[in-house]
Image (spheres, rainbow, N blue to C red):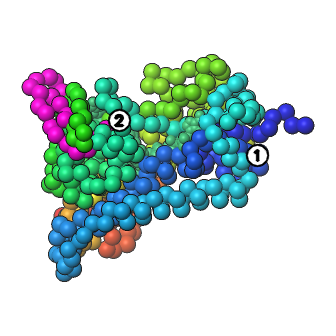
Amino acid sequence: MAEYDYDVLIIGAGPGGYVAAIRAAQLGLKTACAEGRETLGGTCLNVGCIPSKALLHASEYFDAAANGEMAKLGIKVKPELDLDTMQASRKDSVKGLTGGIEFLFKKNKVDWLKGYAAFKDAHTVDVAGKSVTAKNIVIATGSSVTPLPGVEIDNAKGVVVDSTGALELTAVPKKMIVIGGGVIGLELGSVWRRLGAEVTVVEFLDQLLPGMDGDVRKEAAKIFKKQGMTLKLSTKVTGVTVKGKKASVTVEPSAGGAAETLEADVVLVSIGRRPNVDGLGLEVIGLERNQRGQIETDHDFRTKIDGVWAVGDVIPGPMLAHKAEDEGIAVAENIAGLTGIVNHDVIPGVVYTKPEFAGVGLTEEQAKERGEIKVGKFPMMANSRAKTNHEPDGFVKIIADAKTDKVLGVWCIATVAGTMIAEAALAMEFGATSEDIAYTCHAHPTHSEAIKEAAMAVTGKPIHI
Ligand code: FAD
Ligand code: NAI
């Protein structure tokens, strides 16, 4: 009889966990995955990446019809919002994709253990009242919203909500206040602004989108203001009170000063996410967390406890689905005795608004701290495809080492920046110089030509400006 029930047991079926489970099974390991949610796919498929993109996509069409963008192209329409159908379409996308993971689990013979898992010892977990043993256990429990002290989130009531509640609103709010000008606030704020809400973003710092390149952050503020969002930067929320279906939000300058009260029908709390570790029984196995509540691992995704591994949002690094997925593949390969590696220096990040904001590698500020750099920039206004499509906002910026010309970071603002950034990530993964990109033939007319021209601008001159 086998010593353990499974070779690998993964806790959590988000992009980190389900991908690890499928790869482990593909590598011939007997695999189970515990998931407490009713459907597989984690935050990303159920209440994150997928439903938010469904609403971003649909609301973009609505906005294009409503704001005259279509009329400019000779298409005259007066849109009428059918929010129920839009929401049904979102739910349909989620259902299809989460069901797809269930199919993949069956196909690859991954056992789904339905329930929340808690450690009994380093090789045993309890799931739905049953003890299950495994030689290796991978923690992939993801993250959930960071609460704002003193502010109660009630998604069912729909007045003070987190991202899950903001995806499920059944009516367009007249006034929406977004607390936190990061990725969630700008994506979901954009959805409801496009559908007719007056959106005010309250951000503690002096710019939106922390972590992105300084130029990109400055441009983001201009673009979102132009689109009609009210931005209150360097401002903190000191309290939220709810009376019936209305909220009053008290704000004051981050550095202190006179308070002001803003009224709203919906308040979205989007001030970051924190790792899910409650109830997991980490104390039972003696696994400590760092100051940010995350589980630390080595480069192979091993924790300090023998046989226990961790990936995804629960460990340090950007909280992104593709980072979690790559770690999921790597951890399974390491458990199988292969060499699973993730290059954490080259993880693209994308904000899926219109235009999209994307970047990979170092910001100009970070690169300057490490040594001498050269920067090439090219505006989307001078890119023929963007100009033809009436999409003038944005630029591409390439940061390269001054001596070696090696590309250190690429930043794009463009309607398809999320797609364009893949080329930059590939170039950086292969250690490309800006000259390598400049001498690569890019198809015309594409937005990607702006990457080539920005690369030309690093050492010489682009053609079209
Ligand atoms: P999760 O996806 O959080 O999955 C963890 C799973 O573990 C959950 O299903 C949870 O139920 C389960 N679990 C937790 N504890 C236990 C337990 N004890 N036992 C059993 N199961 C347990 N990232 C992108 O890259 N692109 C995007 O466009 C994007 N959009 C987003 C939009 C929103 C609104 C949000 C909130 C997030 C978005 N993200 C996006 C981030 C992305 O969702 C996460 O980075 C990603 O889901 C992390 O994957 P994970 O596997 O680590 O964890
Ligand atoms: P975030 O970290 O992107 O932004 C939070 C913002 O809130 C920051 O700008 C911060 O300065 C601000 N803030 C913090 N406390 C505040 C306060 N008290 N008052 C006002 N502002 C305050 O976090 P967000 O948007 O909640 O997203 C969480 C995670 O989900 C991110 O790490 C992101 O990576 C991931 N995500 C990724 C998406 C994508 O890849 N497109 C989409 C949505 C989420």
Q: Residue furthest bottom?
A: 74
Alpha-carbon neighbours of circle 2 within 10 Å: few (<14), some, or many (≥20)? Answer: some
The answer to whether 17 is drawn above or below residue 197 in the figure is above
Q: Residue furthest front?
A: 244
Q: Residue at x 16, y 75 (%)?
A: 72
> Magenta region's main secondary structure?
strand
Left or right of residue 228: residue 334: right
Q: Residue at x 58, y 58 (%)?
A: 99
Three-letter code, disc 2: Ile
Task: Look at mark 2 in the image and give the residue it sits on.
Answer: 153
Q: Nearer the viewer, residue 295 or 89?
A: 89
> Foreground mark, 2 or 1?
2
Three-letter code, disc 1: Leu
Q: Position of residue 28 (x, y in %)?
A: 77, 49
The answer to whether 391 is drawn above or below residue 363 in the figure is below
Q: Position of residue 406 (x, y in %)?
A: 40, 47
Q: Position of residue 54 (x, y in %)?
A: 40, 60
Left or right of residue 82: residue 339: right
N-term mark: 2 or 1: 1
**Distance between the Cα atoms at labels 2 and 1?**
41 Å
Q: Magenta part of the protein: which range? A: 248-269
Q: Residue at x 31, y 66 (%)?
A: 82
How many circles with numbers are drawn on the protein? 2
> In the picture, residue 367 is in which quadrant?
top left
Q: Residue at x 47, y 61 (%)?
A: 93
Q: Nearer the viewer, residue 63 or 242?
A: 242
Task: Look at mark 1 in the image and give the residue it sits on.
Answer: 29
* Quadrant of the image containing the C terminus: bottom left
Q: Nearer the viewer, residue 214 or 94?
A: 94
